[in-house]
């Protein structure tokens, strides 16, 4: 992939639809609805709940064919349709290898390990450093079953105690390599810490779902310590600082590309989470109650801006509206004399239900941009690594039904002749 060319195409579309991702619909409502094409809203309003569910899950819906909304979806698909890694057969390991390992983690290990073995045949590295390794499942499989020494780094010492205890219980093969647990935090000053003893020019760095700006720290560390290779998976983009952490590459900076704000980073974080129809219905219910609270504050307290009210138990959203809004007004320390009946009548009124429907359909449109923003962030990282002398591949590694954050960056340092 030509990352610069692809970044240009992404940036153009992201800039075009910036009014959608830069703000929550609740901000400046109802004026915010003017950013959404009315013909798209009308089209979505003709769809069944199952068809809206399919749209939200990025599945094909016949009824939208031939529309400008369908063209919008196609552009998004074309720009986010990343290649998948080469498929290898599942690792032929004994049951002990995955004892106590959850389905998601097992799937990720099955996909990652063959790639790491292939890289070891191509690149001279002595050990793998797994950043945020937790209890060390991946490090144990690499070391015990594939003879690749591994260092599992995590700041949570309790997780590591569990991992060390399991190493003592699990069967260790005769030719197994050693697993090292290092309780530490990767930071910008890694050269001044014990981390520099393991992150070096003999170590391949692995970050399986490094949270927020930790992914950038990991990428910079690979460059700083001349690591021969890196495999990075990002997550929790909303934990990055939009001003301090972005953009990463010189190319993005030189092109004056759109800068994502917190709303954009949050949208990128939630971009690709598959769900059941029941989960979708709950999501719609949660959104409707939250939007109804906003409409109530707007109409009765003239509050036009998004107000953070926190989350509550899922069961609350399936109870009468007055129970939800009463709790939220109390949390916001808003005194009132409204009755439970008044709250429920407000929510169930035809006018409010019509507004909630329109707001929800706009959210369906807005959510489509999440994957686009995520790929945009990842390509910034790819370009930074290319600028530092790495050969880079951006690919999908996991079945998104099992592990939604499935985009990985594989970087191998180019040899200097």
Image (cartoon, rainbow, N blue to C red):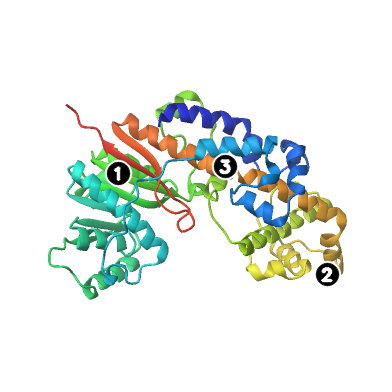
x and y percentages locating residue 179 in the rendered image: 21, 61
Where, quadrant-wise, is the N terminus in this rendering?
A: top left
**Which of the 4 image quarters holds residue 282?**
bottom right
What residue did someone put label 1 on? 230
Relative horizontal placement of residue 107, taking residue 349 as reference (left or right)? left
SS of the residue at dot 3?
Answer: helix
Q: Earlier in the sequence, mark 1 or mark 3?
A: 1
Tag count in the figure?
3
Where, quadrant-wise, is the C terminus in this rendering?
A: top left
Relative horizontal placement of residue 304, taking residue 183 as reference (left or right)? right
Relative horizontal placement of residue 362, taking residue 404 as reference (left or right)? right
SS of the residue at dot 1?
Answer: strand
Considering every residue shown, the one lying at the far front of the view is: 62
Distance between the alpha carbons at the discs numbered 1 and 2: 57 Å
Q: Earlier in the sequence, mark 3 or mark 2?
A: 3
**Which of the 4 image quarters holds residue 264?**
top right
Relative horizontal placement of residue 178, taking residue 285 as reference (left or right)? left
Q: Residue at 70%, 36% (x, y): give it.
A: 67
What residue did someone put label 3 on? 264
Whether pointer 3 and pointer 2 mark residues with C-beta atoms closer than 8 Å, the reply is no
Is residue 312 at least partly visible in the picture? Answer: yes
What residue did someone put label 2 on? 340
Whether pointer 1 and pointer 2 mark residues with C-beta atoms closer than 8 Å, the reply is no
């Amino acid at each position: 992939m030509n990352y610069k060319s692809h970044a240009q195409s992404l940036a153009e579309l992201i800039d075009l639809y910036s009014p959608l991702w830069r703000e929550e619909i609740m901000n400046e409502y109802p004026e915010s609805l003017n950013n959404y094409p009315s013909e798209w809203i009308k089209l979505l309003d003709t769809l069944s709940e199952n068809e809206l569910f399919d749209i939200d899950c990025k599945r094909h819906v016949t009824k939208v064919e031939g529309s400008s909304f369908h063209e919008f979806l196609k552009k998004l698909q074309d720009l986010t349709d990343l290649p998948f890694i080469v498929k290898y057969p599942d690792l032929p390991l004994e049951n002990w290898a995955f004892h106590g390992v959850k389905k998601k983690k097992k799937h990720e290990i099955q996909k990652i390990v063959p790639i790491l073995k292939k890289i070891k045949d191509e690149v001279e590295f002595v050990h793998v450093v797994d950043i945020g390794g937790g209890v060390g499942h991946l490090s144990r499989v690499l070391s015990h079953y594939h003879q690749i020494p591994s260092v599992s780094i995590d700041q949570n010492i309790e997780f590591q105690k569990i991992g060390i205890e399991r190493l003592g219980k699990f069967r260790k093969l005769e030719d197994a390599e050693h697993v090292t647990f290092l309780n530490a935090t990767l930071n910008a000053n890694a050269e001044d810490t014990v981390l520099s003893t393991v992150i070096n020019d003999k170590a391949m760095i692995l970050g399986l779902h490094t949270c927020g700006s930790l992914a950038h720290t990991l990428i910079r560390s690979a460059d700083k310590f001349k690591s021969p290779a890196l495999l990075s998976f990002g997550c929790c983009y909303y934990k990055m600082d939009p001003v301090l952490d972005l953009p990463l590459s010189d190319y993005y900076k030189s092109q004056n590309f759109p800068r994502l704000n917190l709303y954009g980073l949050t949208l990128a974080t939630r971009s690709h989470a598959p769900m059941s129809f029941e989960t979708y219905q709950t999501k719609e219910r949660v959104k409707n109650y939250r939007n109804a609270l906003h409409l109530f504050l707007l109409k009765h307290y003239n509050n036009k801006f998004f107000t953070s009210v926190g989350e509550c138990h899922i069961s609350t959203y399936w109870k009468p509206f007055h129970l939800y809004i009463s709790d939220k007004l109390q949390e916001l320390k808003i005194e009132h004399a409204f009755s439970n009946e008044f709250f429920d009548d407000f929510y169930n009124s035809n006018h409010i239900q019509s507004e909630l429907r329109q707001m929800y359909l706009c959210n369906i449109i807005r959510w489509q941009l999440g994957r686009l923003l995520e790929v945009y962030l990842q390509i910034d990282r790819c370009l930074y690594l290319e600028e530092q002398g790495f050969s880079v591949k951006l690919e999908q590694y996991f079945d998104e039904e099992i592990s939604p954050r499935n985009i990985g960056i594989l970087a191998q340092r180019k040899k200097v002749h």
